[in-house]
Image (spheres, rainbow, N blue to C red):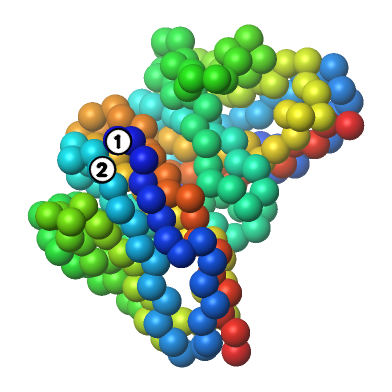
């Protein structure tokens, strides 16, 4: 119940295209869903996060879509750029208490010019 | 705001020696710090959670005597890998949280190579 399932494992997108990464969770106590971007040899950096009170959140080219009833959330990267090539992790936790962050398995995104 | 500094960024040590990794929250007080381990092309695996002034809580399967965690102040946590062996070679990442209504900020990671 603590797992967060992420797909696809890898994704190849042409420059200017849309990258879509999906995640699903089981624990209904989760109410904080961040996405992290990680470059090789670096720690993860917060990209965007959402709470269940909204179904969508957009920041620049990055959008999170959240479906509470399906217990799924996804990251959309619009106008994908070669600089977006990185590994993306979804995660989940319970806001407002000391619970740990549960990570998805990661998606390696490659954007070709 | 919310910057976490981790040192060193990389370290090479001989088998049998101990290595200490530092994690500092630079502009906030971290009530909770987390230590992760990441193998190549894999996700982050939580090793332990530490709260200032109390003993760390280790995840199942993580040897507490091998991975010593000290959270001595609200801005500093250390991970010491004792009697390191080649299989301990990995990427170690810390994370800090200001409080239960704040997000998680990650350090830049430490690449440990045991030879």
Using the numbered discs, state the Cα–Cα distance from disc 2 to disc 1 in whole angstroms.
Answer: 5 Å
Side of A21 where A49 appears, left or right = left
The chain ID associated with circle 1 is A
Q: Is A93 or A11 nearer to us in this picture?
A: A11
Q: Is B91 or A109 nearer to us in this picture?
A: A109
Mark 1 and mark 2 in contact (Cβ < 8 Å)? Answer: yes
In the rendered image, residue A69, in percent from the top left (x then y), is placed at: 12, 55
Q: Which mark is residue A26?
A: 2
In the rendered image, residue B26, in percent from the top left (x then y), is placed at: 48, 39
Q: Which residue is mark 1?
A: A1
**Quadrant of the image for the C terminus of chain B?**
top right
The residue drawn where x is 41% and y is 55% is A6
The residue drawn where x is 45% and y is 10% is B55
Total labels drawn: 2
In the rendered image, residue B32, in percent from the top left (x then y), is placed at: 39, 27
Dividing the picture into quarters, in which one does residue B111 lie?
top right
In the rendered image, residue B50, in percent from the top left (x then y), is placed at: 44, 21
The residue drawn where x is 13% and y is 60% is A54
Side of B107 where B82 appears, left or right = right
Residue B33 seen in the current view: yes
Q: Vertically, is A30 above or below A41? A: above
The residue drawn where x is 88% and y is 26% is B14
Q: Is A40 or B98 nearer to us in this picture?
A: A40
The chain ID associated with circle 2 is A
Q: Which mark is residue A46?
A: none
């Amino acid at each position: 119940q603590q797992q967060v399932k992420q797909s696809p494992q890898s994704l190849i997108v042409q420059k200017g295209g849309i990258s879509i990464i999906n995640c699903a969770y089981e624990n209904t106590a989760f109410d904080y869903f961040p996405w992290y971007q990680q470059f090789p040899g670096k720690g993860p950096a917060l990209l965007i996060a959402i709470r269940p009170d909204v179904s969508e959140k957009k920041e620049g080219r990055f959008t999170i879509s959240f479906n509470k009833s399906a217990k799924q959330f996804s990251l959309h990267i619009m106008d994908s750029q070669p600089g977006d090539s990185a590994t993306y992790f979804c995660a989940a936790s319970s806001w407002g208490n000391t619970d740990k962050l549960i990570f998805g398995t990661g998606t390696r995104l490659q954007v070709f010019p | 705001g919310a910057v976490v500094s981790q040192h060193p960024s990389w370290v090479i040590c001989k088998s049998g020696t101990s290595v200490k990794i530092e994690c500092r929250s630079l502009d906030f007080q971290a009530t909770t710090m987390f230590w992760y381990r990441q193998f190549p092309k894999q996700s982050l695996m939580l090793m332990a959670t530490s709260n200032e002034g109390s003993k760390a809580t280790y995840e199942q399967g993580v040897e507490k005597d091998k991975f010593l965690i000290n959270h001595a102040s609200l801005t500093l946590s250390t991970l010491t890998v004792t009697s390191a062996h080649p299989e301990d070679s990995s990427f170690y990442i810390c994370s800090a949280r200001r409080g239960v209504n704040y997000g998680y900020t990650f350090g830049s990671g430490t690449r440990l190579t045991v030879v």
